[in-house]
């Protein structure tokens, strides 16, 4: 579906393909069960340094990637929360594009193991010459997602936790390890320059003419950044643990609070519930998405979320780019 400019008074998104940060989310689609005139099916690309994780590619994701200026060759992983169509129908086109473009790296596809037959069907949905290098990774329990041979990845760790939906579903959390920020003035005072800076960082200490210098003496703690992706679910322990303290939380808010009974019956969250999780979990930037077509005014979601959450807030629109907040 063609992108539609924001109609709520917000500034227009950056031109397609223009990165605003080395770590940012691109919302390729923000509808729930069915696409609308202004919202495509789900699809979210997380840029994290050299990693690009495509979450929940619904119908039309390949075309939305073109509008956003995202090449299939950039993808390093595809992660599905569950196998409802609005979160997975676009997988067929994405995998065929990986093949067409002869993407050289191995691209793992992570999904609930109970949905394997649908994932396999989507990956072989039509006739094409298979050149894609994908590895299917079925999830059976909470915990760290293992690396696969040939996967291109950085040091951040991807974890998953089981959600509470009408079929098996998992949420995801990406955590960067804590590190150190080297202080140029203290390094210079200790006489450490050039390649010795890297040696000190790796080894933790370095012999110098003035004695052994420990990395703690010439650097400051640098807390790692974090991201969480929570789609179709009722409130459950996994929602709270995935969101706890993250810098950027992308979370479904299919319904407004006046329809909380519908949310509960269909295994979804309201905007108020999602915002409460963010507020109590200390989330720095909350991104609401996955909106039911029954609602016409996105501002309703912001008003409801603001009753409980006062941090950075984005009510996502298609092709929005949301940078991960600067380090604490």
Image: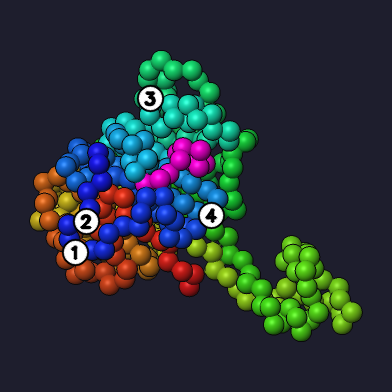
Task: Give the spatial CA distance, label 4 vs label 2.
Answer: 28 Å
Task: Determine whether 57 is above or below 328 in the image.
Answer: above
Task: Determine whether 25 is above or below 112 in the image.
Answer: below
| First to last magenta residue range | 68-78
Q: Position of residue 131 (x, y in %)?
A: 53, 23
Measuring 19% from the left and 64% from the top, which residue is drawn there? 9
Task: State yes or no: discs 4 and 1 in contact (Cβ < 8 Å).
Answer: no
Circle count: 4
Task: Give the spatial CA distance, label 4 vs label 3.
Answer: 29 Å
Q: Which of the marked residues, 4 or 2, is nearer the chain's N terminus? A: 2
Task: Give the spatial CA distance, label 4 vs label 1.
Answer: 31 Å
Task: Give the spatial CA distance, label 1 vs label 3.
Answer: 39 Å
Local packing at callout 2 (Cα closer than 10 Å; few below 14, some 14-19, many 20+) is some
37 sits to left or right of 191: left
Measuring 33% from the left and 41% from the top, which residue is drawn there? 64
168 sits to left or right of 308: right
Q: Position of residue 181 (x, y in %)?
A: 62, 72
Q: Nearer the viewer, residue 319 or 254?
A: 319
User: Among all residues in the image, which is located at the extreme right?
Assistant: 209
Measuring 46% from the left and 37% from the top, which residue is drawn there? 72
Q: Is residue 238 visible?
A: no
Q: Which of the marked residues, 3 or 2, is nearer the chain's N terminus? A: 2
Q: Position of residue 144 (x, y in %)?
A: 53, 46
Residue at the spot of label 1: 9
Q: Is residue 18 visible?
A: yes
State the mark number for residue 6.
Answer: 2
Residue at the spot of label 3: 122
Task: State yes or no: discs 1 and 2 in contact (Cβ < 8 Å).
Answer: yes
State the mark number for residue 49.
Answer: 4
């Amino acid at each position: 579906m063609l992108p539609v400019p924001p109609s709520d008074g917000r500034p227009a998104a950056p031109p397609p393909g223009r990165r605003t940060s080395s770590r940012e989310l691109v919302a390729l689609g923000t509808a729930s069960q069915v696409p609308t005139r202004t919202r495509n099916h789900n699809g979210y690309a997380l840029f994290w340094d050299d990693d690009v994780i495509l979450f929940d590619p619904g119908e039309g994701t390949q075309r939305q990637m073109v509008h956003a200026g995202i090449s299939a060759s950039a993808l390093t992983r595809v992660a599905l929360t569950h196998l409802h169509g609005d979160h997975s129908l676009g997988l067929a086109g994405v995998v065929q594009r990986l093949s067409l473009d002869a993407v050289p790296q191995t691209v793992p596809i992570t999904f609930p193991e109970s949905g394997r037959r649908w994932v396999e069907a989507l990956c072989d949905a039509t006739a094409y010459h298979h050149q894609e290098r994908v590895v299917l990774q079925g999830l059976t329990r909470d915990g760290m997602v293992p690396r696969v041979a040939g996967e291109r990845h950085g040091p951040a760790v991807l974890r998953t936790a089981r959600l509470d939906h009408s079929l098996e579903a998992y949420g995801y959390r990406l955590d960067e390890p804590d590190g150190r920020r080297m202080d140029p003035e203290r390094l210079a005072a200790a006489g450490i320059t050039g390649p010795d800076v890297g040696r000190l960082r790796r080894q933790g200490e370095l012999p110098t003419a003035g004695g052994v210098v420990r990395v703690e003496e010439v650097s400051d703690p640098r807390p790692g950044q974090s991201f969480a992706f929570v789609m179709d679910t009722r409130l459950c322990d996994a929602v709270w643990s995935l969101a706890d303290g993250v810098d950027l939380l992308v979370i479904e808010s299919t319904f407004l609070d006046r329809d909380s009974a519908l949310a509960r019956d269909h295994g979804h969250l309201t905007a108020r519930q999602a915002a409460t999780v963010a507020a109590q979990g200390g989330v720095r930037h909350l991104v609401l998405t996955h909106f039911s077509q029954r609602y016409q005014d996105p501002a309703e979601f912001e008003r409801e979320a603001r009753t409980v959450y006062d941090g950075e807030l984005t009510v996502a629109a298609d092709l929005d780019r949301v940078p991960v907040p600067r380090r604490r």
